[in-house]
Image: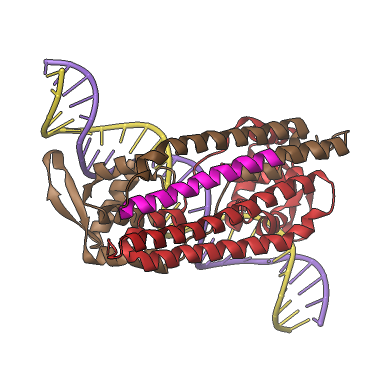
Chain colours: A red, B brown, C yellow, D purple
Amino acid sequence: MSLRHALLGLLSQGSASGYDLLKIFEISLANVWPATQSQLYGELGRLADAGLIEVVAEGPRGRKAYGPTEAGMAELRHWLVEVPPEQLRRSDMLLRVFFLGAVGAEQARAYLKEQGAVATRSHEHLETIRPIVADDDHDLSVYGRIALEWGLRFTRMQQEWAEWAAREIEAHTSRTPSGTGV
Amino acid sequence: MSLRHALLGLLSQGSASGYDLLKIFEISLANVWPATQSQLYGELGRLADAGLIEVVAEGPRGRKAYGPTEAGMAELRHWLVEVPPEQLRRSDMLLRVFFLGAVGAEQARAYLKEQGAVATRSHEHLETIRPIVADDDHDLSVYGRIALEWGLRFTRMQQEWAEWAAREIEAHTSRTPSGTGV
DNA sequence: TCCTCCATGTAACAGGTTACATGATTCC
DNA sequence: GGAATCATGTAACCTGTTACATGGAGGA
């Protein structure tokens, strides 16, 4: 149920309409908690019904700008500090690693090298947005920077791991030259 | 649709019943691709209907052991090398970071330190299972070791990041002592 | 006028979780 | 005989995705 809290969090930083929020999701939250338009409007309705947000302004074309209520802010703070984050991560990238024995060392190495390259590209992309968040001292900037740093460290780790793994397979292959598995 | 491929992958390493597979999911795949019992039996039925697996043995209590068909193995290899892994990662741990401005520096630091501690515990847990996979040269062991190494590097990265982030907040707080945000 | 963008909503479907339901076998 | 374990299956519900549907407002 974290979409609910993502919305509360965004609205705590300033009121916005569903349309505004959708844009914010696309730019800044896309890598952390993607959401689609239909999901978003549905959840806004449910949040309003639950009294956690309310319409604070209406505009042209039926535009409704929402803001959090006191109950909504309380719920957000509760979630932030008292609800332990989910640990579960599904990774089909890693799932494949378990079964790489089904395709022979050459293809296994190619797979890992490709994953390393993907990580490198992601890392480079994140580097390009670093300067945008870098230069000020607001709260938003501090926490944005911390999240960005996570991405930078993660992509670097993944890149280094993939290269290490490709070398491991090479070493294993040279020890057992016949190549087991298929 | 990766549960399907997780099942094909496991069955490619030896035939098994739904019950067997469930146990394997609980132990070895739990951190990478969790699956519930009801999901599993449903998918086994669909895989059989699609001709990707077949019943290779029947046992007591209605036990049905499945093995992959040739079509199933082809599908597995196709998925392994030709279908690019999903990049999407939802992380409610990271989502919270974006909104930490809503709770004051003290609580924000406490949150990050807790996440660091969680990562440390996970890392220690993974270290305990390292010796189990370490000592042989089979394909399975090689790829199991590579996946484990990912976990070790990931948890270490997360731990270091959380500690760094907590220090960042401290530095920011001492620069702007009043404490902005709520 | 026509196109683009703003703006909201619904319906159908897929994947996943929890809970319910049932029964056979083995071991003590 | 009774408990634990093996073994499979179904139903209700929630979250998320894709696609469909509609219309107002502003600019060229």
Q: Dominant secondary structure of the magenta stretch?
A: helix
Q: Nearer the viewer, residue A53 or B38?
A: B38
Q: Residue at x 53, y 47 (%)?
A: B153
Q: Position of residue A124 (x, y in %)?
A: 66, 64
Residue sitting nearer the eye, B8 or A162: A162
Q: Is residue A143 left or right of residue C24?
A: right
Q: Is residue B86 left or right of residue A174?
A: right
The magenta segment is B138-164
Is B158 one of the magenta-colored residues? yes
Q: Please name the residue shown 56% across and 35% down the image.
A: B120
Q: From this view, report whether residue B59 is shown above or below residue A154.
A: above
Q: Is residue B89 above or below residue A119?
A: above
Give the percent coordinates (x, y) of residue A72: 70, 36
Spot occupied by residue B86 in the image (x, y as percentages of width and height): 49, 60
Which image quadrant is residue B104 in?
top right
Nearer-the-camera pick, B78 or C12: B78
Q: Say above or below: A118 vs A79.
A: below
